[in-house]
Every structure is written in C-alpha cells, then in structure tokens.
Amino acid sequence: MIILGIDPGLRKTGFGIVEKRGQEYRLINAGVIRLDKLSDLHDRLLKLFFEIENLIKEFNPNCISLEKAFVGKNARSAFMIGEARAVCIVAGRKANLPVYEYPTRSIKQGLTGFGGAEKKSVKHMVKVILKINGEISDDASDALAIAIFHGNIGYNRNS
C-alpha cells in the first residue's frame, strides 16, 4: 500500500509518500510544496491543487491521509489551513482516492506514545521508522508521520 501523507499549509505544504508492506515502511519521497506568500490566495490554492494532483499522478498512492482541522488560538490561521486542506481533499477525491483525517494528538500518540509530543520527538520516530539518516524538514516529517500513522492505525480502523 502506498500512502500520501499531507501536512497542509498556504505557505508550505509538507508531503510524504511511504510504502507499507506488512509491518515495514519504505520512504518513497518527501518534501515541501512552497507557495509564494506574496501571491494571491486563490493562486496559491490553485498551485497547491496542481502540485498535489501531480504527486498523485507520479506516485499513484492508494490513499491520502491528513491532519484533522484544529482551531487553536488563531482562528484566521486555522481557517486558511482549512482552505488548503479542502484543496488536498478535492485533489484526492478527483483521483478517486479515499481521504482519511486524523487528530494531531492521535498521530503524536501513535508514533511516540505521547499525544503532546514535541516536533523533534515525532521527527525522531519518523527517521527511525523510515531509516532516514540525514535531515528532513519539519513539514515533510509531519506529513510522513501522518502517512505512517495511517499505515499503523488508520488503515486497520478505516478499511
């Protein structure tokens, strides 16, 4: 099974693509889609759509997994992330892929054993699971964590 994990944002969207075979994971690709923070919001959303669509075409995932929307202290920021999430969902559904969503705390709990884990702890577990020796960006690491979580927990629960 190939899983595309996405950590959506309007300036940077992390993506991580993993293959799960049995209990083993293999890193296929990961990175960051950089969206010009000075460009028009609608242009950024359109570019994000095309970038996700291209990832789907190139890597042919079986599904997409995303973090559920979270409204913290900044409702405006959460709303904007919601727009990026919607674009990712539409790109996935346009390709007839199932799209799964998980709470951030559940993802952290599933990877580190603690729902309030810091980014560096999540990144450490992602690197261990995928046998990554070098550095990886926070955005790509978060996306890979979402993909791994789906492979570990979500796939069994939602299949």
Image (cartoon, helix red, strand yellow):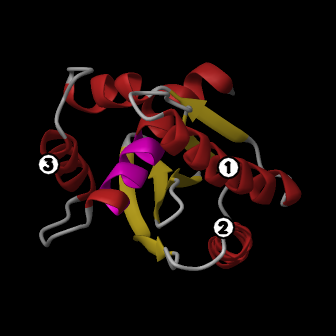
* Amino acid tagged 3: His
Query: What label sits on residue 41 in the rendered view?
Result: 2
Q: Is the C-beta separation of discs 1 and 2 under 8 Å?
A: yes
**Secondary structure found at label 2:** helix
Name the residue carrying label 3: 124
Where is the C terminus found, in terms of image quarters?
A: top right
Name the residue carrying label 1: 83
Query: What label sits on residue 136 in the rendered view?
Result: none
Ranked by sequence position, the earlier of labels 1 and 2 is 2
**Secondary structure found at label 3:** helix
Ranked by sequence position, the earlier of labels 3 and 1 is 1
* Amino acid tagged 1: Glu
* Residue 82 coordinates in the image, percent (x, y): 63, 43
Q: Dot 3 surroundings within 10 Å: few (below 14), some, or many (20 or more)?
A: some
* Amino acid tagged 2: Leu
Residue range in magenta is 140-148
Ranked by sequence position, the earlier of labels 3 and 2 is 2
Looking at the picture, does residue 73 appear above or below residue 96? above
